[in-house]
Image (cartoon, grey):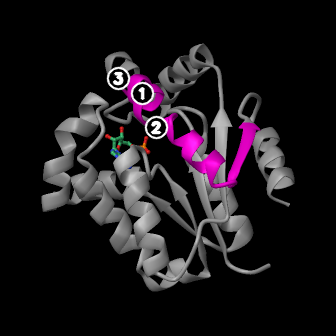
């Protein structure tokens, strides 16, 4: 299989990060997860981390410019040449536009955009359960609500953009991790 370049979109709690990790391992490509990179920046106390922390804790989206720079630097690294799965970027129309401009400059194109769909009540249940296990500082109920709203209003509309580009693959995100992974695998071929 040639290098694969994928984008995963899904609401908070849909298992997007887990599925992106599984895909990256299975296909031997690089997972580019802006949320993970931002959390690492916060933990390391870098300038990026300092600028991102308050918004992340509140469940709000970080500035387009900041996160776009983070994603751009990561995609330009050597290991992303074997292929990548974008996890958590883009999340706004402005970020999607930046990505559309950035990829041709790197000489690559997206192959598929996988959208994981899960009912919102199920998501809140999952996120509250994850909060107890992982202790992520943004897994409290108020922050979860803000993140859901950001997804609904800013990120979910991007699906239309990828549909128009003919890249969209819809995946039912209900059930356990393995079930969802099998659906994604079947859909991507
Ligand atoms: P995630 O791990 O993908 O759920 O991301 C955790 C948090 O990082 C989000 O709630 C945002 O505050 C921030 N974040 C991650 N990726 C982005 C992005 N592409 N645009 C804006 N904020 C982001």
Mark before the other along the chain sequence, 3 or 2: 3
In x, y percent, where is residue 166?
69, 54
> Can you say which quadrant of the picture contains the C terminus?
bottom right
Q: Is residue 32 above or below residue 173?
A: below
Please rate how many residues cluster around mark 2, counting C-alpha atoms within 10 Å: few if below 14, some from 14 to 19, many from 20.
many
Q: Quadrant of residue 145?
A: top left
Classified by dominant secondary structure, the portion drawn in magenta counts as helix
**Residue identifier under label 3:** 146
Q: Nearer the viewer, mark 3 or mark 2?
A: 2
Q: Which residues are magenta?
A: 147-171
Helix, strand or loop status at disc 2: helix
Mark before the other along the chain sequence, 3 or 1: 3
Question: Mark 3 and 1 residues: CB-CB less than 8 Å, in contact?
Answer: no
Q: Is mark 3 within 8 Å of ligand 1?
A: no
In x, y percent, where is residue 111?
67, 65
Measure how far apart labels 3 and 1 are at the Cα level.
Answer: 11 Å
Residue extending farthest top: 121
**Residue identifier under label 1:** 153
**Residue identifier under label 2:** 155
Q: Is residue 155 above or below residue 187?
A: above
């Amino acid at each position: 299989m040639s290098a694969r370049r994928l984008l995963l979109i899904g609401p908070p709690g849909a298992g997007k990060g887990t599925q992106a990790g599984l895909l990256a391992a299975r296909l031997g490509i690089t997972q580019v997860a802006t949320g993970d990179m931002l959390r690492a920046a916060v933990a390391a106390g870098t300038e990026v981390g300092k600028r991102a922390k308050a918004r992340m804790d509140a469940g709000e989206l970080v500035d387009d410019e900041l996160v776009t720079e983070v994603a751009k630097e990561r995609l330009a690294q050597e290991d992303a040449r074997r292929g990548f799965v974008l996890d958590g970027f883009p999340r706004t129309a402005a970020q999607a536009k930046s990505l559309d401009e950035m990829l041709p400059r790197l000489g690559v194109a997206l192959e598929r955009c996988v959208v994981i769909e899960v009912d919102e009540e199920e998501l809140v249940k999952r996120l509250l359960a994850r909060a107890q296990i992982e202790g992520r500082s943004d897994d409290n109920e108020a922050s979860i609500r803000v993140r859901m709203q950001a997804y609904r209003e800013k990120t979910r509309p991007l699906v239309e953009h990828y549909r128009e580009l003919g890249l969209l693959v819809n995946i039912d995100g209900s059930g356990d991790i393995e079930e969802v992974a099998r659906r994604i695998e079947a859909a991507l071929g």
